[in-house]
Image (tube, grey):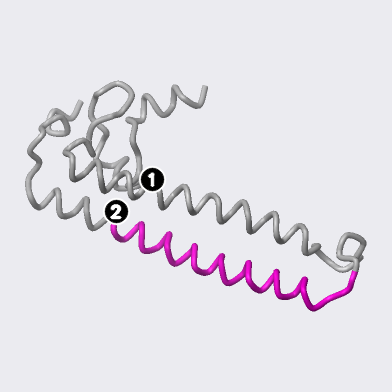
Amino acid sequence: MDDAANRPDRPAAEQRAAAERIRAARAEAAELAANLERQWDAVVAAAAFTNNDDEHDPEGSTLAYERERLTAMRDHVRRELAGLDRAAERLRDGAYWTCERCGGPIAAARLDARPAARTCIGCAAGARR
């Protein structure tokens, strides 16, 4: 168990590194969100300028499928952005390295891989069962 993870006063360098990981992940997610919005706009524009029955088009995917796919992806990236915003708040509050479920430490490797993680690996694995 990483006793350092339970310390309320993390070293400044560790705080800055965590803030940078969160910022970088948020920037990447925001870029993806913008790209998905552009794709959404293109699908909407394509639907507006066609009178084809896309539900019965034998060529490839339908516009309805593309709208649903993009809706799901946009929802996912919005949840990711919200999670990263919560991670930044938790960092400011000093709770970033503490599992919200059990109060134990969240491993540094987990936070490196998933900057928005709010639970330790044990609790995350238990939640999936």
Q: Main secondary structure of the magenta part?
A: helix
Label 2 residue SS: helix
Instruction: Look at the numbered disc 1 and give the secondary structure of its residue.
Output: helix
95 vs 125, nearest the viewer: 95
Across and down, in percent, residue 111 comes to: 29, 43
Q: Which residues are magenta?
A: 23-52
The reply to whether discs 1 and 2 touch (Cβ–Cβ < 8 Å) is no
Depicted 122 relative to depicted 92: above or below: above
Image quarter where the N terminus lies is top left
- Answer with left or right where residue 36 lies relative to residue 61: left
Residue 24's tag is none
x 49%, y 68%: residue: 34
Name of the residue lying farthest toward the bottom: 49
The numbered mark at residue 83 is 1
Q: Is residue 90 magenta?
A: no
Q: Amino acid at mark 2?
A: Ile
Q: Residue at x 25, y 23 (%)?
A: 103
Q: Is residue 44 magenta?
A: yes
Report the side of 58 relative to 102 (left or right): right
Q: Which residue is mark 2?
A: 22
3 shown above or below 85:
above
From mark 1 to mark 2, how far is it between C-alphas?
A: 10 Å
Q: Residue at x 80, y 63 (%)?
A: 61
Q: Position of residue 65 (x, y in %)?
A: 76, 57
Q: Is residue 49 left or right of residue 115?
A: right
Q: Residues within 10 Å of mark 2 (few under 14, many from 20)?
A: many
